[in-house]
Amino acid sequence: MFDLADLAVPIIAAPMAGGPSTPDLVVSVGEAGGLGFLAGGYKTPEALADQIREVRAHTDVAFGVNLFVPQQPAYDPAAVHEYRDRLCAAAQRYGIELPPIRERDDDWFAAKVDLLVEQRVPVVSLTFGLPSADIVGRLRDAGVMVIATVTTVAEARSATDLGVGALCVQGPEGGGHRGTFRVEDEPETTPLPALVGEITARCPLPVVAAGGIGDGARIAELLARGAVAVQLGTAFLRSPESGAKTAHKEALNDPRFTRTVVTRAFSGRPARGLANEFIATYDTAAPSAYPQVHHLTSPLRAAAAERNAPEDMALWAGTAYRSTSADPAATILRGLWKEAVARGAAGGPDSGNRADR
């Protein structure tokens, strides 16, 4: 079974749903000594299977797949209908019609688990909660390392009790969705280094630190706090291997976008992105309803991307977004690790295992 401690470079490319995490990005990061992740969220099982085959056609190194754990349908239908009405003006501006409200969506979770068991994917991470012990057991029995995304000590303890192999500890500084177990939860604000320290002191599992990491100094700090690896997403968004929309890549380096904020406006779940006009207009009205709100705004976001209109796009980004580079993913990874080593990051389980590559 895969062991995080065996990574030549303890840097993971975060699974970024919606297009950024391409097979090319996974391969590039893996070949450079890190661990790449495919984002299984929002994909059909068939599309995910195609991406797994593409990765394996180009590399023999380990990689991971992330799945969204299905959400309990606990939301206020009236609030979602009201939000849909508010969005109609934006839809008219783009000449599109909003879809009907989707009451339930399990994102083909069971079929994707079957696929990953059959394919014996080396690593599977889970976001937005925990599945049943049976599912974790099936993955483990297939030789899959299971990582649970957690945002609090309580969530970490629940994941540990379930029998997962490692924890991805996600701090408030990270871009995109915060992986709280419940949609309605307001994310805690404990900074990532402190959160990693709290969880490593209470849970025996290996910890991957994630959220707002943009330089070698922060990587070295988190490894010193007890993390065995770090996970970065925003850092790779502008790379040529990233599948992020052009407008999204450009916005990360655009002086018009001066800060990130946490909002439910695009999906109904708390998520961090660049502050833009859509968030300013709709944030206070957005209900806690995922994936209902996600499906409502999806065609709006797609239309905005087609028109290169970042003010209406979900420009997911962590707090370190200004440090991003348009270099190839392997160059980014190696540069970050070189910085981390210069800042005192340990070379791995033995002094020669994690070389300055």
Image (cartoon, rainbow, N blue to C red):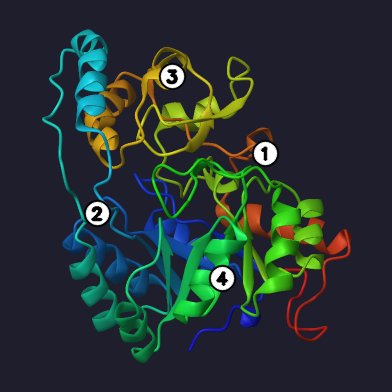
Earlier sequence position, callout 3 versus callout 1: 3
Q: Secondary structure at mark 1?
A: loop
Residue type, mark 4 in image:
Arg
Between 342 and 293, the residue placed more toward the observer is 293
Residue 284: assigned label: 3
Earlier sequence position, callout 3 versus callout 2: 2
Query: Could you tell me how far apart the alpha carbons at marks 1 and 4 are, in whole angstroms?
Result: 29 Å
Evaluate whether residue 164 shows in this view.
no
User: Circle 1 sits on which residue?
Assistant: 320
Say if mark 1 contacts mark 4, CB within 8 Å. Answer: no
Q: Position of residue 48 (x, y in %)?
A: 25, 62
Say if mark 2 contacts mark 1, CB within 8 Å. Answer: no
Query: Could you tell me how far apart the alpha carbons at marks 4 and 3 are, in whole angstroms?
Result: 33 Å
Q: Secondary structure at mark 4?
A: helix
Residue 208: assigned label: none
Residue 157: assigned label: 4
